[in-house]
Amino acid sequence: MNAGYFPVYKSEFDSMILMIDKFRNLRDDGLNRKFYNSTDFKTSHITFQIESIRRVYGDSYDINMVSSGPFGQTILKISDQKFSLNENEHSIRGLLSYLKSRKKEIDKGDFIQ
């Protein structure tokens, strides 16, 4: 497997975007100590590993997205508790923006990098 690639089935792309979108307000969710249940975030080939870390000024989150298939498992860390809620939220919103901009190409069947 080439470094830098995260395999996603085309049929699950929209679901993946919707699941990631639930983390778009991570800063407010952390300050309000929102609990995310990993079982609510899965498709046939994508699962999320979510860990809430309690902190004095709100929760922090370790969130990994795991893609499984005949190629094995690939993990993409979308939130790292080592970084601030603001930094993680900014990264998640950037990822969402990128995925949504590429959706048209995926729908047409064009190759994406």
Image (cartoon, grey):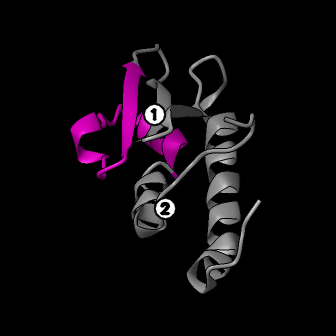
Q: Give the extent of the magenta segment.
A: 24-52
Residue holding disc 2: 17
Frontmost of labels 2 and 1 is: 2
Which quadrant is home to the C terminus? bottom right
Task: Quadrant for residue 99, please give it.
Answer: bottom right
| Residue plotted at (54% across, 31% down) | 75
The one nearer the camera, 89 or 6, is 6
Q: Residues within 10 Å of mark 1 (few under 14, many from 20)?
A: some
Q: Amino acid at mark 1?
A: Leu
Is residue 43 inside the magenta stretch? Answer: yes
Task: Quadrant for residue 12, please give it.
Answer: bottom left
Depicted 105 relative to depicted 43: above or below: below
Depicted 70 relative to depicted 12: above or below: above
Q: How many marks?
A: 2
Which quadrant is home to the N terminus? top right
Residue holding disc 1: 31
Q: Which mark is residue 56?
A: none
- Compared across the picture, whether 57 is left or right of 88 comes to left
Depicted 83 relative to depicted 41: above or below: above
Task: Pinpoint residue 41: horizontal percent, then vertical percent.
Answer: 31, 46
